[in-house]
Image (cartoon, rainbow, N blue to C red):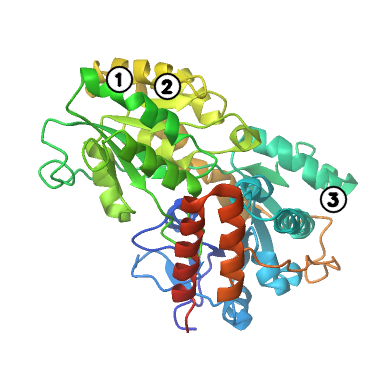
Amino acid sequence: MTEIAQGSSREHLLIVSQDLVNSKMAGPGIRYLEMAKCLSHELDVTLAVPAETSLKFPEINILRYFEDRPESLQLLVENADIVLISGYMILKFPFLANCKQRLVVDLYDPIVFENLHYFQDEPQINQDNQNKQAINVTNSLAKIGDFFICGNERQRDLWMGVLMANGRINPKTFTQDNSLSSLIDIVGAGFPDRPPRAVPFLRKMVPEIPENARVILWGGGIWNWLDPLTLVNAWPDVLAVHPEARLVFLGTRHPNPVVPDHEMAFKTVQLAEQLGEKDKSIIFFEWISYEDREALLCESDVGVTLHPIHVETRYSIRTRVLDYLWAKLPVLITDGDVTSQWVREFNIGIVVPPDDSKAVSKALLELLDRPKSTWEPNFATLPDRMSWSHAVKPLLNYCLYGRHAPDRVPGENPIALPVAMPSARPVGLGQGILRAAYILRSKGLVAAWHQIIFHLKWLISHKR
């Protein structure tokens, strides 16, 4: 393939993204794009994506693969020295289990915990099947990787247990490196080495946002495992003191049409309507481009992310908080996750208890009463610790100097690959009607309508 560099003496890394990489993208796409750009300084990097993209960067190759044509990805794998995969790629492309390239497995997204939220509205048999499949996929990934990366120290402890249970912590890997950093290390999220680009985006451009508005930003998707409702419930108390304040939600729907819409987004919009503030002081964007996201960050005054306390919280890595830190936004965040520790450590915002709207309104008023510029010195040391160039160092070191795991024989992985369970994605009109009927009985009319809309979107996006 002419797009793949030939004759280079540098190591060739193939990063395989499961999610869209385009002008509008969510956290996984952003993660792999930024990693690719950063690693390209010392490696030849190809970023494989599952759909067409308009993005082009001179330093990296962005090439498409097709899930129904395994050879499209296999060709890219055969032209690489190191391959980075994650999630369900081993299920979609079983040949990866026996590839001769060095295999890096990205475990930053604990899919077992995520699926507990994704499929909570499904019939019990679907939930059980999806859970079983996620566990089987995770165990398969643990068996085939040469090197594993994850999001933070808490995650590393979690994945060390998974690796141990799958026999990957053994005399060979221990002898190679008794810290096991050669087996699994931390490559979390980061932000670019440059400042975000400030161009007009909200003020004077969006009628509901006057030039003197104080903008509170929810800078990511409204996912089921987060808690935007407490923020909206706190909003009337904020408006009473700061009528010029505006609450902006970045995305009500995932930019990838095959990802289910989240019920929490509908609940949040409904609550804003009940308060009479939707499209007035509370603004919802469907999603915006990667470049517009930078402008939105620069024009905001406070960045917010709230969550309940559950198992996903402990092991999460809130990529939207890294955006806030990049733009030097003071942060309002719920206690309990790793990023709330950063907010405390660097004194760059306020940490509140879960499900406490009074604490949220009090914190927002305190943040709005203090000019954003006065927080800026507290962000001074963060680029050296949280930029992408810093975050990818363990992965870069492995690509330059690493080798196959001592207990893995390239091309010989006789593992029992996971079997595909019944899909939780719609495959026909009949299944969609049955699922909507189930949700109508269990969750009500709004959730059922939400399911029907998602089903129609999925059918349209998959029409050949």
Mark 1 vs mark 2, CA separation in Å: 9 Å
Q: Amino acid at mark 2?
A: Ser
Q: Are marks 1 and 3 in contact (CB under 8 Å)?
A: no
Q: Residues within 10 Å of mark 1 (few under 14, many from 20)?
A: some
**What residue is pinned by disc 2?**
357
Residue type at numbered disc 1: Asp
- Residue 201 x/y as whole percent: 18, 47
Horizontal side of residue 112 vs 307, given as left or right: right
Kindly identify which residue carries mark 3. Answer: 166
Residue 422 position (above or below residue 325):
below
Look at the numbered disc 1 and give the secondary structure of its residue.
Answer: helix
Mark 3, mark 2: which one is toward the viewer?
2
Relative to residue 385, is residue 79 drawn left or right? Answer: right
Q: Nearer the viewer, mark 1 or mark 3?
A: 1
Q: Quadrant of residue 240?
A: top left
Task: Report whether 50 appears left or right of 329.
Answer: right
Is 333 above or below relative to 111? Answer: above
- Residue 324 horizontal/vertical position (percent): 36, 35
User: Is disc 2 surrounded by few (<14), some (14 to 19) or many (20+) residues within 10 Å?
Assistant: some
Are dots 1 and 2 in contact, CB under 8 Å?
A: yes
Q: Element under label 2?
A: helix
Q: Is residue 404 visible?
A: no
**Residue under numbered circle 1:** 237
Q: Residue furthest right?
A: 171
